Image (spheres, rainbow, N blue to C red):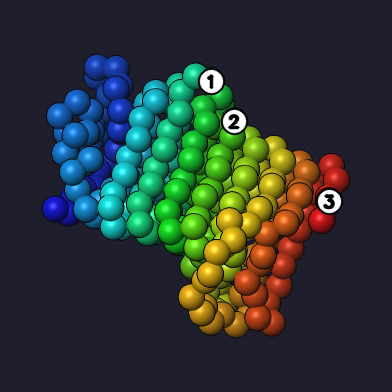
Amino acid sequence: PQITAAASRVSVGELPAGVAGLVFAGGSLGALANAQDIALKSYSTIDFYGTVELAAANGLTLDAREIRAIGDGADRVKVSAGALTIANANGGPVTGRGGDVSMLLAADNIYFAGGDKWISGVSALTIDAAKRVIGRDDGTLFTGGALTIDAGAVAAESGGRMFFDAGGAITLTSSGGNLDPFSTFGATIGFTGSALTSSGPIGLTRGILNLRARARAGL
C-alpha cells in the first residue's frame, strides 16, 4: 500500500494530547509501518516525538521546511527506506534549533531536494546511504548538532547546488561497495561545520566543492 498525506503540521510518535494537525500515533502509526511507499507533506513542520521509527520498503518522502525531533537525550529517531527524499518544495524562512535527540536517516539512496530545510532538536544526525547521497535543486540542510554522512558517494545532479551546515562537527566517511554509474556536470556541493573530517568520495565532474570548518579542517 501507499500512503500520501498533507497537512498544516504532521506529527509522528507518542505525542501529548491536543497537538494540532495530522497525527500518526498508535494504530495510525501502525498503518504507516505497513506501507510500501510514504509521502508526508507539512506546510510548517514534521515532528517526531520521543523514540520512534518510520520506515518504508520502497520510497519515503518528507516534505517540510523543518523536521523536528522532540524529546531528550535518551530518544532515538530512525527514518529509513529504499529511497529516501528530504524536501522543501514550498520554501519559506525557518529558524531551527539544536537539541538532545539522535536521528538516523538510512536508505540505499538519499535525496535532498527543494529549498533550505532544518533538522532540529538533534545533537547528532547520521545520514547513512548504502549507495549515494544526491542533491537536487538548490538548497541547504541545516542542523544544530554534529553531522555524520556515511555513503558510497556524495553527489549532486547536473547544475544542482547542495549544502550541509552543521552547528557541530561534520564527518564524511565511505560505506564502500560498488556503485551504478551516475552522470553529473557542473554541480556544487558544500559542507560547513565547527570541524570537518573527510574520508568519503565526492562525485563531481567539473563542479565546485566547498569545505569550511569554523574551527579547523582535517582531510
Residues at marks 1 and 2 touching, judged by CB atoms closer than 8 Å? yes
The numbered disc on residue 73 is 1
Closer to the eye: label 3 or 2: 3
Residue 19 image offset from top left, x and y in percent: 27, 24
What's the residue at 76%, 48% (across, down)? 196
Label placed on residue 14:
none
Name the secondary structure under disc 2: strand
Relative to 166, 132 lies left or right: left
Numbered disc 1: secondary structure = loop
Q: Which residue is mark 3?
A: 218
Which image quarter is the C terminus in? bottom right
Q: Earlier in the sequence, mark 3 or mark 2?
A: 2
Which of the two discs, 1 and 2, labels the residue nearer the N terminus? 1
- Label 2 Cα neighbours within 10 Å, binned few <14 / some 14-19 / many ≥20: many
The alpha-carbon separation of the residues under discs 1 and 2 comes to: 8 Å
Is residue 138 visible to the viewer in this orientation of the structure? no
Question: Please, which residue is most extreme toward the front here?
Answer: 177
The x and y percentages for residue 31 are 16, 39
Label 3, secondary structure: give it.
strand
Amino acid type at circle 3 is: Gly
Q: Residue at x 43, y 59 (%)?
A: 108
**Residue topped by disc 2:** 123
Answer left or right for 195 relative to 27.
right
